Amino acid sequence: MIVDDYKFLQIKDATACINQQVNLIGVVVETSAPKQSRGTDLFCSVKIIDESWPLGFHIKFFAETRAKLPYVDTLGDIIIVTHVVQTMGSEVVASFKKRSSSFALFEGRECSGKEFMPYKFSPNYKPRDQDKKFITGLRKWCMQQKVKGLNELPSFKDIKEGKRLNLLCKILHICEVKKNEWMLFVWDGTDTPPLSVEAKLEDEMENPLPLDLDPSPLPRDILCTFPAVGTVLRIIVDQGNESLGIKFLKTNKWVKIISVKCEIRASLWRAVLMPFSRICYLPELDTSVVQRQRLYNERLPSTWGRMPFTCFPWPSYITETEYPDVPFVTLMNVLTHEEVTYKYRCVVRVVAIFPWRVEDFRSPSGIYRLRLTLEDPTARIHAFLYAEDGTKFFGDFDSMDVLREKRDMLLGVPEEDKSQEVQKVSRNPPWIQCCLKSYYTDKSDVWGSRNFRIFDTTFVG
């Protein structure tokens, strides 16, 4: 059948044209990254909708190189395809033929002077005046409709272990951790839920809780580009998923990541891209993106906006500081502060203590010497509790039972497990407030020798 180049079918009508060539125009709601076909070609899939078929319809594209495939800038853009062939398998799909088919991609919103100029098209695409009418109609329809697939994505605060999720987030950084293994650093302005700590207390000497899941510490200049509020989630991309085209992703772009699996490692959240995962760019004016950015912008100027979501209306009352009127900051604020030496007030959880035995908290001369692992939704750090700061925090007394009780309250040891000193128990540390100060130990390397210390904080139970 010879198709009329000027006749476009609605998707609903096209689904009935099995083994026939058709012309289609639709709104892109989903894309897949390029993958290797069984032959020498690469292929990808683009899911489109129109007024007649909001359920979505897939078009499969094949090409010799990535550059010849339709690279969709953002979901909600419009695609025109001609001479694609409808085929029937488990569902009706359209196949793009390299020699006879053509495509063109247009922005989903009107842009001054470029409303009808495609930003990517195949060599055999021929623009027609009739295209403008179809593009204008789809743009108006898309603006009037809340298109399913472009909105209502869960935030980081709603993630759950083992569940497959679609995430809406911003790509902040991409790094290759090993050959053909990548890590994405993504953010959406919200906090991941706090996790129970499963590690044994005595393991902190030989096998301490890691401060992050990064194979090596991120350079300070990269860390300083991250937002100070909201969790930066790590997403693992292993060798089996290199076909997702991770190296071609752009940073500082909002994306929808389809079907990722959330996991817990060392009581920290991470996500894993699956072989069937897909990454799609979203426009800055997408409803969900605008809403996510608005919530973040409203959170920042609030007096308590840097407190973790899950500690509202206030952290536990087991600690007090000497500076109740100083605004809280996040641990990411602490790590990225422009001055090496500074003082801060934070809301944190104590997830580990070293040494763990209360009998070892003080030296033989009676001086406190502890290292606490602190965390909030943005980071983990080590902070020391030393000498007079330790005395102010715990008090000056000789009862090991009282000290042990305070330690267990800080670490969130359940009441029924407090007698099991060397057992692995599930702990849920409370949110506490504390004052921190940063300092350096080597004048020739002030940033490299920077440490943190708790001060002017008292455990009041």
Image (spheres, rainbow, N blue to C red):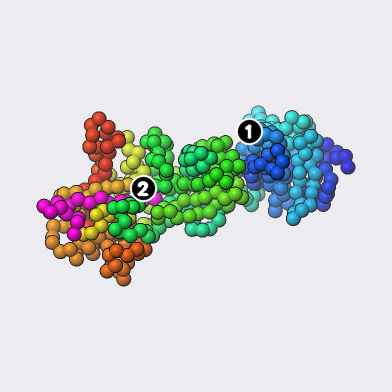
Q: Residue furthest bottom?
A: 416
Name the amino acid, label 2. Leu
Residue at the (15%, 49%) spot, across then down: 388
Magenta span covers which residues? 359-379
Q: CA distance from mark 1 to mark 2?
A: 45 Å
Q: Position of residue 140 (x, y in %)?
A: 68, 43
Residue at the (29%, 63%) spot, across then down: 422
65 or 408: which is nearer to us? 65
Q: Residue furthest left?
A: 365
Residues at badges 1 and 2 in contact (C-beta under 8 Å)?
A: no
User: Does 373 appear in magenta?
Assistant: yes
Q: Position of residue 38 (x, y in %)?
A: 70, 44
Could you tell me which secondary element the residue under label 2 belongs to?
Answer: loop
Label 2: how many Cα within 10 Å (few below 14, some 14–19, many 20+): some
Can you identify the residue that label 1 sits on?
A: 111
Name the amino acid, label 1. Cys
Quadrant of res 9: top right
Could you tell me which secondary element the residue under label 1 belongs to?
Answer: loop
Is residue 428 visible in the rendered image? The answer is no
Can you identify the residue that label 2 sits on?
A: 211
Asked whether, in this view, residue 4 is left or right of residue 29, the answer is: right
